[in-house]
RNA sequence: GGACGCGUAGAUCAGUUGGUUAGAUCGCCACGUUGACAUCGUGGAGGUCGCAGGUUCGAGUCCUGCCGCGUCCACCA
């Protein structure tokens, strides 16, 4: 007996089959010369947190492709791993350390902090991997890597060394976002801006030795007067007249295309500039000339002499037309400083107080210095005016304190082309896409990639952090002494050439860089991987290692080749069993290098380059571009052939999901509620090419399960998503209980998932869910029950004679050859449809159109296999006369063959349920007819031992039969039409109706052949069919092109009602006919449209007219006109 | 400010190079449970494809403009 429950229980299947797959080693990918490789490198999740819906989408698609390719016979590697995510991870650990123990990183020191982060990392890595596994991820888990493990570290060191030696890494200045509270640089995306009330100070800078006719002062305006202490110039536009004209004509262009309501505003602006031209232009021209003459100004308060320079940054249409230049504390001013060769004066200490450069203001905080500077300027009569003005200020997301732009020494990778014009790193990466060696799907994303790389901006790779790959550079001020010490290591200095000889020739690279003090240079020594003893020797020689670490993206850029063992060509990369990736915690480092074989590292050349990168669009620049670049540089080949960019998941309000908004759905909650397969299937159905996905979410009442709609809620600082039945307010008033959700069904209150508070321990919490996943759950249930039906009918059973009510035995499934003679219409049809569907699915998957593939396979499963095929074979499986028992075995065999193919087709989408069913099917049908052999014959073969390793169905081409499909369609249409009549006349399902069909003789024959299906599916008895059939009186009719059906309904027919129904049909047909006639009457259409289109319209028209005639005949019969 | 995308049924989305009557899922309405499945079946209602122009024999699809929305990048004296 089949013991399948009525509903699929995912929990059991998920645990059972995942460990089965893993223990069998099905996920493992190793070089196999007999197979082609298929490689996907996972976009590394950060070790900072849990997986979210974006990961679920990203992971599902990769697993889907990997499973599909594996079944197609590829050696499919999906490489897992995690990213150390420098800034984010260190920030999380530092924050927790501070909150829980009140310690800062300076309290514990570098090594201790890094150790703490390792502990955190191990914990979270486990959690993330666990989550990925619960999604069914068929990664080769033996190969799990971490961007700070030994293998990746070696690749990072080697890459850095090569770049440095090639002169592609250099030291330079750059303004960073400095958090004075945490004393660290923060990334752009950790900076937020807020508008506050501020002032706009107009300050006079005295001109030194003004000539007759020249102004005594130049006026500038600033929102940050204290920065004048770091000013090194004042700029004026080099051609103010042209610039003003340009501004005016740009505005005039706008005016031409602007909406009416915007016009007055633009006109006002034009007026203002015109006025300014009159009032300021002569002065600005004069200043420009003074700048050209190299005239100097006296910096107020510090009495420094600074030049007046001509630079386009100074916009004559703004302010006074002049602008102070503070290269060390403003991004734009920094650029001006570079262009104009101005010195940069840093006036800040790391803690945000002013340093000795600020002279008398040294030691003051920024705010205090501003007050004093303003007061002193006023006292010196240099302050012209103070305006109130709303200004935007940058704040650190982490410390919530103000961000200061801060000039610092950083390391860069040169992206531009070489001096001789040969392509640089950026150009190489651009060429790879332009020549289609890397292809984007959808193609439009190539533009994002090319535009960004086209700027060829140098890549700043240093970060002021402790968590990460430390920069392998040791430096010391250049001197006789330091040169001599380097000479001990084989470094020689000949004029400006630095050479390295001897045993360290390949382990060291040396160049020069700017030292802190002007006039001094630094000797920069880069130490190659595996030569850390040289670092110690350098330290002994008075060199210091750079304190910074590398940008996280530097290591993740190497992911595609580093994980495969590059640069080690001697050994295969080690597998996790022999591999520790957490040196500090493990206490000892394991040796890098895995199995040594005569052939060297066979893994790298086999799996590189990868096949496809699956990612979201926000890291096309940060990550994708850099992987291509380093791949080309290190490997001489691109890291992957395809880049598939999938959509983002948004909430019902169209906003990005995130923890900080409270609208994030936890994939684990969903898996818990709907099952992994349901989630995967639904997610795959979302993944199209055009749109991001809106996933409306609800809160699920923990008491009764009711769904409560969300709403947006504005707090002082952010907009969050909360339940629409919110009771209480945020921020939670002192002493008040936390806000709750009130359930509209059961009236119970509960806390809910929100970024605004942590729910009380043990309290019932309303989680965020989405009904959309019922789509996948229902599909799985349908598949489950269809299979349940099949399995029930494969066992021996008992039939009952319709007439005698005598029982008789039904045979169980036995394997056996099925030839075309054994096949009924529906068998041939479902095999034809299966052939078409599997081809279509593979085609869509190869174009990464997962939504289309999901639809195709769902339609086949539900609307064709379940709704039609299973229904049609029921009579054969359960004959009602003992003499018909022989119809059962062929039906069973075709059913098994189709189900077998269907499970394989579905496996990449819903792996757990298909494996479960595959194994159940194997118990009763270990040998199944294969559809991929010769057409029209099903030969039994033993099934693969697991669905995951079964071959992807390639149904033999010959099964496809379009003419059969269209005949079948007529049958379907007829049945639907009969059902329609039954529904309209409310005929009970158990009452048989007679059916007469007027049609050509050949059609009539076909209908007689399938007469039993009319009975089976529409409870209709085909009484007559043929050209001679005439409409019986009191009957309902329908027409389907080449056949008219009549259902005599003596006593049931309401003549008026039927007349109306038919008249409605007639009017509809007439509408269509008019449309077609109009087209054909148009000589232009007939002449210009392609012949096949015209023919099609003619054919359609004929058909429509036939139908219309039939309907009109029916109407006349009914007594209408 | 620049780039890219989106706007199609009450909701969420498909709609291949322009070509008969614009589809699906959920929801809705009516009917239906002894035989795989109510997480189901059968039938049905529901759309002037954001707006305005244009190209074309023909536009949801191509072009221009506008309106609304989103994402990324840049910038903000």
Image: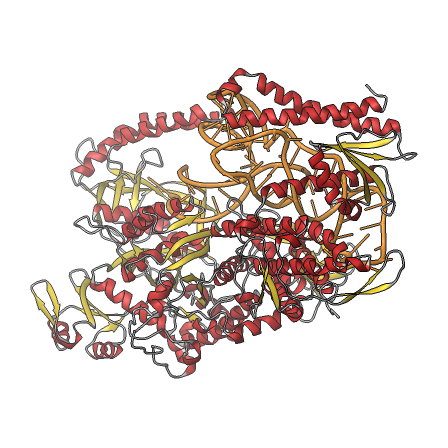
Quarter of the figure that contains the C terminus of chain A: top right
Question: Going by the image, does A228 lie left or right of A75?
Answer: left
Question: Going by the image, does A545 lie left or right of A849?
Answer: left
Question: Does residue A664 lie above or below B77 as drawn?
Answer: below
Residue A327 rendering spot, x and y as whole percentages: 28, 51
Q: Is residue A261 visible?
A: no
Q: Residue at x 16, y 63 (%)?
A: A520
Residue A50 rendering spot, x and y as whole percentages: 54, 65
**In this view of the protein, which residue sits in the foreground, B44 or A276?**
B44
Label total for image:
0
Q: What is the basis of the colouring in this image?
A: secondary structure
Question: Does residue B44 lie above or below A543 as drawn?
Answer: above
**In this view of the protein, which residue sits in the foreground, A843 or A884?**
A884
Farthest right residue? Answer: A1051
Q: Residue at x 85, y 24 (%)?
A: A1118
Quarter of the image for residue A982 reads top right
Q: Is residue A221 visible?
A: yes
Residue A657 rendering spot, x and y as whole percentages: 56, 54
Question: Does residue A322 lie above or below A1076 as drawn?
Answer: below
Question: Going by the image, does B25 lie left or right of A474?
Answer: right
**In this view of the protein, which residue sits in the foreground, B7 or A362?**
B7
Question: Does residue A5 lie above or below A215 as drawn?
Answer: below
Quarter of the image for residue A443 reads top left
Question: Going by the image, does A832 lie left or right of A1031?
Answer: left
Farthest left residue? Answer: A495
Quarter of the figure that contains the N terminus of chain A: bottom right
Residue A621 rendering spot, x and y as whole percentages: 38, 52
């Amino acid at each position: 007996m089949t013991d399948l429950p009525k509903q699929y229980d995912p929990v059991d299947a998920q645990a059972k089959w995942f460990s089965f797959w893993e223990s069998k080693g099905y996920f493992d990918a190793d070089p196999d010369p007999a197979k082609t490789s298929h490689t996907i490198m996972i976009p590394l999740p950060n070790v900072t947190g849990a997986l979210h819906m974006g990961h679920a989408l990203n992971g599902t698609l990769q697993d889907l492709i990997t499973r599909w390719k594996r079944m197609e016979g590829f050696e499919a590697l999906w490489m897992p791993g995690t990213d150390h995510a420098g800034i984010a991870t260190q920030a999380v650990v530092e924050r927790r350390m501070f909150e829980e123990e009140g310690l800062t990183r300076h309290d514990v020191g570098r090594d201790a902090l890094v150790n703490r982060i390792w502990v955190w990392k191990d914990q979270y890595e486990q959690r993330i991997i666990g989550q990925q596994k619960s999604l069914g991820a068929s990664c080769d888990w033996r190969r799990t890597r971490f961007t700070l493990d030994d293998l990746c570290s070696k690749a990072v060191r080697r890459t850095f060394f090569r770049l440095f030696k090639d002169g592609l890494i250099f030291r330079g200045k750059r303004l960073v976002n400095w958090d004075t509270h945490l004393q660290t640089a923060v990334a752009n995306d950790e900076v937020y801006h807020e508008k506050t009330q501020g002032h706009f100070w107009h300050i006079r800078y005295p001109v030194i030795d003004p000539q007759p006719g020249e102004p005594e002062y130049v006026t500038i305006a600033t929102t940050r007067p204290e920065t004048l202490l770091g000013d090194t110039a004042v700029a004026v536009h080099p051609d103010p007249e042209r610039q003003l004209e340009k501004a005016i004509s740009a505005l005039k262009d706008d005016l031409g295309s602007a909406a009416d309501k915007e016009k007055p505003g633009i006109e006002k602006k034009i007026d203002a500039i015109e006025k300014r031209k009159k009032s300021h232009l002569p002065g600005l021209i004069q200043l420009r000339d003074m700048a050209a003459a190299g005239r100097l100004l006296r910096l107020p308060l510090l009495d420094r002499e600074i030049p007046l320079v001509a630079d386009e940054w100074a916009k004559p249409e703004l302010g006074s037309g002049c602008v102070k230049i503070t290269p060390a504390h403003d991004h734009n001013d920094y650029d001006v400083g570079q262009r104009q060769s101005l010195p940069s004066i840093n006036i800040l200490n790391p803690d945000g107080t002013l340093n000795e450069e600020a002279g008398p203001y040294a030691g003051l905080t920024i705010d205090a210095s501003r007050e004093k500077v303003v007061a002193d300027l006023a006292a010196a009569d240099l302050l012209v005016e103070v305006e109130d003005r709303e200004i935007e200020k940058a704040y650190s997301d982490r410390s919530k304190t103000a961000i200061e732009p801060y000039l610092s020494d950083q390391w860069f990778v040169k992206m531009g082309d070489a001096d001789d014009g040969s392509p640089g790193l950026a150009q190489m990466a651009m060429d790879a896409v332009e020549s289609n060696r890397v292809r984007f799907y959808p193609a439009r994303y190539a533009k994002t990639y090319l535009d960004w790389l086209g700027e060829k901006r140098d890549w700043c790779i240093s970060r002021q952090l402790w968590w990460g790959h430390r920069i392998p550079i040791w430096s010391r001020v250049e001197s006789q002494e330091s040169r001599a010490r380097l000479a001990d290591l084989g470094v020689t200095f000949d004029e400006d050439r630095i050479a390295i000889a001897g045993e360290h020739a390949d382990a060291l690279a040396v160049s020069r860089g700017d030292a802190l003090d002007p006039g001094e240079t630094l000797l920069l020594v880069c130490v190659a991987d595996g030569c850390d003893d040289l670092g110690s020797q350098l330290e002994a020689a008075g060199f210091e290692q750079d304190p910074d670490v590398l940008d996280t993206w530097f290591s993740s850029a190497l992911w595609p080749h580093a994980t495969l063992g590059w640069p080690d060509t001697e050994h295969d990369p080690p597998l996790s069993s022999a591999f520790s990736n957490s040196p500090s915690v493990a206490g000892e480092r394991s040796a890098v290098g895995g199995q040594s074989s005569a052939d060297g590292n066979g893994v790298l050349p086999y799996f590189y380059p990868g096949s496809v990168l699956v990612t979201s669009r926000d890291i096309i620049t940060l990550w994708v571009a850099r992987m291509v670049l380093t791949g080309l540089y290190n490997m001489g080949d691109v890291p992957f052939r395809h880049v598939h960019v999938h959509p983002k998941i948004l909430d019902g309000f169209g906003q990005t999901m995130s923890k900080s908004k409270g609208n994030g759905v936890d994939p684990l909650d969903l898996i818990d509620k709907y099952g992994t397969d349901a989630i995967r299937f639904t997610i795959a159905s979302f993944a199209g090419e055009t749109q991001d996905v809106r996933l409306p979410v609800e809160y699920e009442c923990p008491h009764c399960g009711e769904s409560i709609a969300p709403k947006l809620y504005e707090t002082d600082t952010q907009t969050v998503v909360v339940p629409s039945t919110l009771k209480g307010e945020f921020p939670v008033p002192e002493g008040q209980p936390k806000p709750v959700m009130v359930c509209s069904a059961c009236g119970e209150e509960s806390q809910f998932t929100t970024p605004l508070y942590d729910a009380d321990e043990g309290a019932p919490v309303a989680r965020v869910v989405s009904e959309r996943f019922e789509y996948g759950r229902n599909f799985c249930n349908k598949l489950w029950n269809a299979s349940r039906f099949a399995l029930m009918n494969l066992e021996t059973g008992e039939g009952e004679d319709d007439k005698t009510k005598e029982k008789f035995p039904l045979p169980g499934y036995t394997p056996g050859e099925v030839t075309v003679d054994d096949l009924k219409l529906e068998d041939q049809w479902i095999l034809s449809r299966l052939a078409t569907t599997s081809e279509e699915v593979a085609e869509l998957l190869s174009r990464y159109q997962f939504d289309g593939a999901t639809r195709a396979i769902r339609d086949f499963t539900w609307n064709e296999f379940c709704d039609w095929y299973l229904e049609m074979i029921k009579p054969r499986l359960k004959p009602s006369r003992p003499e018909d028992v022989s119809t059962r075995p062929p039906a069973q065999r075709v059913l098994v063959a189709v189900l077998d193919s269907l499970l394989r087709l579905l496996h990449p989408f819903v792996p757990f349920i298909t494996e479960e069913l595959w194994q159940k099917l194997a118990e009763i049908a270990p040998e199944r007819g294969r559809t991929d052999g010769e057409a029209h014959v099903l030969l039994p073969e033993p099934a693969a031992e697991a669905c995951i390793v079964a071959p992807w169905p390639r149904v033999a081409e010959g099964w496809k039969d379009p003419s059969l499909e269209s005949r079948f369609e007529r049958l379907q249409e007829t049945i639907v039409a009969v059902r329609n009549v039954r529904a309209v006349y409310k005929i009970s399902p158990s009452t048989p109706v007679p059916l007469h069909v007027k049609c050509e003789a050949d059609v009539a024959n076909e209908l007689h052949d399938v007469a039993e299906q009319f009975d089976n599916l529409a409870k209709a008895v085909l009484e007559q069919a043929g050209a001679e059939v005439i409409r019986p009186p009191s009957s309902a009719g329908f027409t389907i092109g080449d056949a008219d059906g009549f259902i005599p309904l003596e006593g049931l027919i309401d003549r008026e009602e039927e007349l109306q129904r038919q008249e409605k049909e007639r009017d509809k047909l007439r509408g269509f006919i008019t449309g077609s006639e109009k087209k054909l009457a148009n000589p232009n259409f007939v002449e210009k449209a392609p012949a096949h289109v015209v023919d099609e319209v003619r054919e359609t028209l004929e058909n429509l007219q036939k139908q219309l005639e039939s309907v009109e005949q029916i109407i006349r019969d009914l007594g209408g006109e």
